[in-house]
Each structure stands twice: as C-alpha cells, then as structure tokens.
Image (cartoon, rainbow, N blue to C red):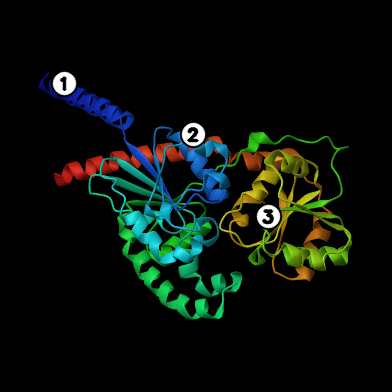
C-alpha cells in the first residue's frame, strides 16, 4: 500500500511537470535573427518558412531593403540595426564588412526564451543571456573567412581592396571563432555543412534539410516533355555554368538557362545557337520549364542546392556534379546521374549515360517529397521545443 501511494504520488508529480512544461513551451518567446534581407535566395526562403512556423516571432537583421524582397516580408515584424541608416546599402553593402559584427552584438535579446539565428555569417554572433536558448540554423560557416582564396577568385576586387582585405578577413576570423560558444545548438542544412561546422568550429550539428515547396509542381504529360536540358541558377563564375555551355556546344543539344548575374555576358558570348538565355523569370514561369525539361543540370559544388529538388518535385531527373549537397538529394541511377570531374569529358559522359536510363517519375517525385516544406516545419518546430525544454532543465539544475 505504501509503495502504491508513493508510485501514484510520483506519477501525479510527473503529470504536473509535463503540464507545466507544455504551458511553458506554448508561451515561449522566440526571435529569429538573419544576416541581412537585401536579396532573395535560398536562405531568405527559409526565413519565410521559419516565419510560418513561428508567426509571432520578430525578425532581427542588419539591413532590410523592402524593394529587393517579396511582398510577404512586408507583413513581418522586421527590426533592423544602426546599419539601416548607412548610405548606398543597395550597391555597397559588402563594403561595410567590418560593421556587421557590431550590428548583431548590439541587439538586446534578453526578453526572449529562444533565439533562432539563421546564419551563414553574422547572425550567430548575437549575444544572449544564460536564460536564453540560442539555436543556430547554419547554412555554412562564414565562407569568405574559411574559404578565403576561393572567395577572392569569385569576386572582382581592385588592387587596393586585395591588399587590405586579408587584414580584415583575419579580424573577422577571430571574431567568428569568438562567437562559436554563443550558440547552444547548431543545426546544419546538410551533412556536408555539418562536417564543415565540425572542422571549423569543433562543434557537432544536427541536420535539418531546408524547405522545398514540392506541391507547387505537377507532372507534365509525356507529350508535353520537351528535348531541352535546363539550368536555373545565379550566373556567377563558381556555379560552373561555363562548363555546361562548352559541353553542350560540343553535343549540340538544346539547353535553356534561366537566371541572371555578372557572368551572363561572358556565357552568352561563348554559347552556340542551341543555347537560350531567358534571364530572370518568376517562380510561376520557371515552374513550366522545370515540368517540361528533359533533365535538369546542376554543375556546381553546393552546400545543399534547392534547384535539383525543385526539378525532382516536377518529376524530372537531374544530372549533377557528384560532390557537396547533391550527394544527399540526388540518387544516382534512380533520380539522376552524377559526373565526377569538372571537365567536358566527364559531363558529356554523364549526359550519354543519362540517355540510356529509363527513369521512373514517381520515384523521382517521392525522393523530393522527403524534403518537403512540411517536413522542415515539423522538424524545426520539434527541435526548438526539445532544445528549449533541455535548456530550461539545465538552468533549473544550475539554479540560474
């Protein structure tokens, strides 16, 4: 009888604790912190979805240029730093390189239970108190610090900048390392990035893949599928679009390139008549090209890569460079094929192998659905709740 009494008391106490915890989680105050909102890319699409998951959360950022962002951001509670008042932000935001750390360090986030930083550079540098759980959704450790030589090759810098930049980068590297332990838990966008976080920061990271709006796409009738191969990309040097252009010049196969960027004029000069450049299109316009292409080409080494999954969402196979995030999103021989080297011969061989395989569009689509937006929303919400609970238990044990 005594045993039963104490067991029932223990169960009741556990029930009360669980109910209290549910109440705490429901009343959790959370802030989202993002590097900057001055161009729309994969990271900003993720912020859009984070706002859907946590609609009451304000978004702190260094600068926000409404004209460069979709209308959906106008409905959000966006709070900017002192940098918002600096001149020439639209064209010269990179010139303020050394100011970004101060912008984030000066935010006062003491009122929040959880800070969720969305970062490839600065946002994880926010300072929080011991009662706040800081989770960093990391797209990559600061690329221009940790891959400096590669970064310099990508960008067009003048002689003076190239002399000054190494000193600035060294300062930023020290700052970046000093902020590593500001973060309680890291989440990486891919296993590839998790390995980089381990190498650069000596921290473990969970992997939650970014959201893909798979249900935006449909399957085209077989009669609607055309013979062209497709690229959707920013036209920068490191994207390796020139390799695809040179390969398709030799193959003579039709190639459609959607996107804009500083490399566009060069690519147009070297392209044959079988290659079309459509510039920047809306998501609805791109949708049709995804659905009707013969295959999607993804030649770069990316941290993750949303576009191959958008193509697979449209039931279309992918020809991808077999490094980086593509290894986690494309299944060789089932949803696409890989090429192993950045050479014309390697890509040409992949195109020829691709044409010998009969792909099942439903297998392709199912693979894409495992990365759907709904999966991301469930995973990130659960992760935040678990880590917030663990943080509460930790500070309770420490008597904070």
> Which x, y percent locates residue 239?
66, 62
| 400 sits to left or right of 109 | left
The residue identified by callout 3 is 233
Nearer the N terminus, badge 2 or badge 3? 2
**Going 61% across and 53% down the picture, which residue do you hit?**
305
Give the foreground label among 2 and 3.
2
Say what secondary structure mark 2 lies in. Answer: helix
Give the foreground label among 3 and 1.
3
Say what secondary structure mark 1 lies in. Answer: helix
> Which x, y percent locates residue 285?
74, 41
The residue identified by callout 1 is 4
| 115 sits to left or right of 270 | left
| 354 sits to left or right of 284 | right
The residue identified by callout 2 is 75
Q: Quadrant of the N terminus?
A: top left
Callout 3 crowding tier (Cα within 10 Å): few <14, some 14–19, many ≥20: some
> Which x, y percent locates residue 278?
78, 51
Nearer the N terminus, badge 1 or badge 2? 1
| 225 sits to left or right of 235 | right
């Amino acid at each position: 009888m005594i045993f039963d009494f104490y067991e029932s008391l223990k169960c009741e106490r556990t029930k009360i604790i669980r109910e209290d915890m549910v109440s705490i989680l429901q009343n959790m105050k959370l802030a989202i912190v993002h590097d900057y909102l001055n161009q729309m890319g994969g990271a900003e699409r993720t912020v859009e979805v984070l706002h859907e998951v946590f609609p009451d959360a304000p978004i702190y950022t260094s600068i926000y240029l409404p004209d460069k962002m979709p209308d959906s951001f106008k409905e959000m509670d966006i709070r900017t730093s002192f940098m918002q008042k600096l001149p020439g932000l639209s064209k010269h935001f990179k010139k303020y390189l050394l100011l970004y750390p101060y912008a984030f360090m000066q935010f006062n986030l003491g009122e929040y239970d959880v800070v969720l930083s969305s970062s490839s550079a600065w946002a994880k540098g926010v300072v929080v108190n011991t009662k706040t759980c800081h989770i960093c959704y990391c797209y990559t450790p600061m690329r221009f610090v940790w891959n400096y030589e590669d970064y310099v090759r990508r960008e067009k810098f003048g002689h003076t900048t190239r002399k000054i930049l190494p000193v600035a980068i060294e300062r930023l590297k020290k700052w970046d390392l000093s902020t590593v332990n500001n973060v309680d838990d890291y989440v990486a966008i891919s296993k590839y990035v998790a390995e980089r976080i381990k190498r650069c920061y000596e921290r473990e990271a969970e992997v939650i893949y970014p959201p893909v709006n798979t249900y935006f796409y449909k399957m085209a009738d077989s009669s609607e599928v055309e013979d062209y191969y497709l690229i959707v990309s920013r036209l920068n040097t490191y994207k390796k679009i020139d390799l695809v252009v040179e390969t398709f010049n030799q193959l003579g196969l039709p190639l459609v390139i959607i996107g804009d960027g500083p490399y566009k004029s060069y690519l147009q000069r070297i392209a044959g008549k079988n290659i079309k450049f459509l510039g920047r299109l809306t998501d609805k316009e791109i949708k049709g090209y995804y659905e009707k292409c013969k295959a999607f080409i993804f030649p770069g080494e990316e941290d993750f890569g949303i576009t191959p999954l958008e193509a697979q969402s449209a039931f279309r196979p992918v020809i991808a460079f077999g490094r980086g995030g593509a290894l986690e999103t494309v299944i060789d021989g089932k949803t696409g094929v890989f090429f192993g080297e950045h050479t014309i011969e390697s890509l040409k061989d992949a195109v020829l192998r691709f044409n010998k395989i009969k792909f099942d569009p439903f297998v392709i689509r199912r693979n894409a659905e495992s990365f759907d937006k709904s999966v991301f929303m469930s995973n990130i919400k659960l992760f935040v709740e678990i880590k917030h609970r663990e943080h509460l238990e930790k500070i309770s044990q420490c008597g904070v």
